[in-house]
Image (spheres, helix red, strand yellow):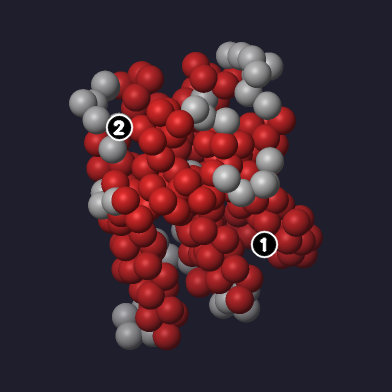
C-alpha cells in the first residue's frame, strides 16, 4: 500500500464503513432513533458519522493535491476527535450505569470494547498529529482511527444479516482478524528498516495486544471490579 494509493484506499474504506453503518445500525438504532436511546447515543452516532466523512474528504483532498483544503479540514479534527473519543466513554458509562445489578454482572465484560476502542482511537489520532510532518506515518495513523470502527460496524452487520454465531465474542475473531490484517498491510508497505516502520510497528503491536486482551482480561474479577468502579462514577 504505497503513499500514492493510500488516500484512495482510505477514501474507499471510509465510504464502505459509512454505507455499512447505515445497514448495521438500522435494526437497533436508525429504525427507531427516538426510542429512549438518549442524547448520548445520538451524540456518539453523529460524531462517528462526521469523523468518517472527514476522513473521506481529507483523503480526497490529498488525492486531488488540494493540500491547503486538507489542512483546513484537519483543523476540524482538533475538536471532533476528542469529542468522538469522549462520546464513546460517556455513552458506555450511560448504558452501564443504568443496568440493574444482575444485567451489569452479566454484561460487564463487554465494557472492554468501547473503552479500549476509545483509548486506541485517541492514541492513533495523537500519533497522527505528532507525525503530521511525515505523510506516510500521518496517513497510516489516521487510517487506524477508521480501522477501529470495523468491529462495531462489521460485527453488527455479520450478526444481523450474515450469520448467528454461538457466542458474542466469536464475532471479534472475524472483525479483529480484519483489523490485524490491515495493520499488517499498513506496516509492510512502509520501507524496510526505516524509522517510520519501527514507529508504526510499536503502535501496531500495542493495538494487536489490546485486541488479544479482549479474549482474556474482561472475564477476570479484576476487570469486573474496575468496571463496577467505572459504572459508579458520577459522569452521566
* x and y, in percent, of residue 43 in the image: 70, 36
> Can residue 190 be seen here?
no
Question: Viewer-proximal residue, 191 or 155?
Answer: 155
The residue shown at (41%, 40%) is: 108
* x and y, in percent, of residue 11 in the image: 55, 47
Spatial CA distance of label 2 from label 1 is 43 Å
Secondary structure of the residue carrying tag 2 is: loop
Crowding around mark 2 (Cα neighbors within 10 Å: few <14, some 14 to 19, many 20+) is few
Residue that mark 1 sits on: 65
Apparent side of residue 138 relative to residue 215 in the rendered image (left or right) = right
Secondary structure of the residue carrying tag 1 is: loop
The residue shown at (52%, 63%) is: 124
Crowding around mark 1 (Cα neighbors within 10 Å: few <14, some 14 to 19, many 20+) is few
The residue shown at (41%, 70%) is: 203
Residue 168, numbered label: 2
| 156 vs 66: above or below | above
Mark 2 touching mark 1, by CB under 8 A?
Answer: no
Quadrant of the image containing the C terminus: top right
* x and y, in percent, of residue 19 in the image: 53, 30
Question: Viewer-proximal residue, 1 or 98?
Answer: 98
Residue 126: quadrant of the picture = bottom right
Amino acid at each position: 500500500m504505497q503513499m500514492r494509493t493510500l488516500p484512495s484506499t482510505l477514501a474507499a474504506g471510509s465510504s464502505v464503513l459509512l454505507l455499512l453503518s447505515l445497514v448495521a445500525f438500522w435494526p437497533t438504532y436508525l429504525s427507531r432513533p427516538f426510542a429512549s436511546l438518549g442524547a448520548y447515543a445520538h451524540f456518539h452516532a453523529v460524531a462517528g458519522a462526521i469523523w468518517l466523512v472527514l476522513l473521506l474528504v481529507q483523503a480526497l483532498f490529498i488525492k486531488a493535491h488540494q493540500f491547503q483544503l486538507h489542512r483546513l479540514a484537519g483543523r476540524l479534527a482538533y475538536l471532533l476527535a476528542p469529542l468522538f473519543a469522549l462520546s464513546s466513554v460517556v455513552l458506555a458509562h450511560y448504558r452501564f450505569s443504568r443496568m440493574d445489578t444482575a444485567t451489569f454482572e452479566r454484561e460487564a465484560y463487554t465494557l472492554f470494547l468501547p473503552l479500549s476502542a476509545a483509548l486506541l482511537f485517541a492514541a492513533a489520532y495523537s500519533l497522527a498529529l505528532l507525525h503530521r510532518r511525515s505523510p506516510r506515518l500521518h496517513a497510516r495513523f489516521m487510517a487506524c482511527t477508521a480501522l477501529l470502527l470495523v468491529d462495531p460496524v462489521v460485527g453488527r452487520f455479520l450478526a444481523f444479516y450474515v450469520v448467528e454465531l454461538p457466542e458474542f465474542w466469536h464475532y471479534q475473531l472475524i472483525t479483529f482478524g480484519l483489523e490485524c490484517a490491515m495493520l499488517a498491510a499498513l506496516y509492510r508497505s512502509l520501507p524496510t528498516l526505516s524509522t517510520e516502520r519501527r514507529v508504526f510497528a510499536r503502535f501496531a503491536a500495542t493495538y494487536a495486544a489490546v485486541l488479544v486482551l479482549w479474549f482474556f482480561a474482561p472475564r477476570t474479577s479484576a476487570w469486573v471490579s474496575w468496571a463496577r468502579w467505572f459504572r459508579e462514577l458520577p459522569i452521566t
